[in-house]
Image (tube, rainbow, N blue to C red):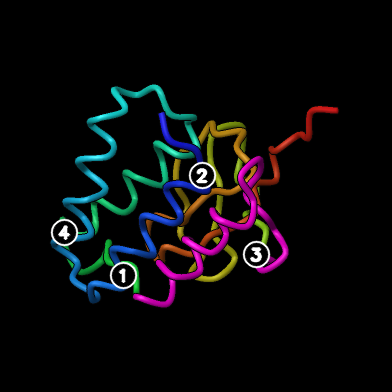
Amino acid sequence: MKNKKEIGKELKKELEKGYNVERISNWAYDLFNESHGEQSLELNDILQTIFLMDAGPEFVLSKSQLTDLANELIRDDINFSTEIINDIAEIGDDEWLICPKCFDAWESNSSDKIVQCLKCHSFLQNPRYKQIE
């Protein structure tokens, strides 16, 4: 099972080969399947977000977004750093979050530190996240 830092480094290597949505999506899909769901929920969500890029243009992350994601994974192997992620998702109700950038709402019961808007793909701090002391 790979940690965040290893996945971040591999993502950077994929990006060094050139920004190709299909190839990067296939890489993430293969990695997701190799782990058989043994990764953390956060890493599974990140890999799913990447491999779903080839599902349509509305799911594509830019090269810049992928680079930022890789850097965050490398920098913070324990928790996803929020230093460059300043926007916070809003709580709609017990099961819904709202993106402050595009105002889209999605059903989420995630308690991970970071969530991603399904419409604009912005990474956001999760207001339901509780740091374990």
Q: Nearer the viewer, mark 4 or mark 2?
A: 2
- Mark 4 or mark 2: which comes first in sequence? 2
Q: Which of marks 3 and 2 is in front?
A: 2
Disc 1 vs disc 4: Cβ atoms closer than 8 Å? Answer: no
- Mark 3 or mark 1: which comes first in sequence? 1
SS type, badge 1? helix
Name the residue beneath numbered marker 1: 15
Residue 34's disc number = none
Q: In which quarter of the image is the C terminus?
A: top right
Q: Which residue is drawn at 23% across and 51% down?
A: 52
Amino acid, disc 1: Leu
SS type, badge 4? helix
Label 4 to label 3: alpha-carbon separation:
25 Å
Label 3 to label 2: alpha-carbon separation:
17 Å
Name the residue beneath numbered marker 2: 4
Circle 1: is it few (<14), some (14-19), or many (20+) Cα within 10 Å? some
Q: Nearer the viewer, mark 1 or mark 4?
A: 1
Q: Is residue 129 above or below residue 80?
A: above
Amino acid, disc 4: Asp
Name the residue beneath numbered marker 3: 85
Going by the image, does 119 lie left or right of 114? left
The part of the image, by quadrant, that contains residue 100 is bottom right
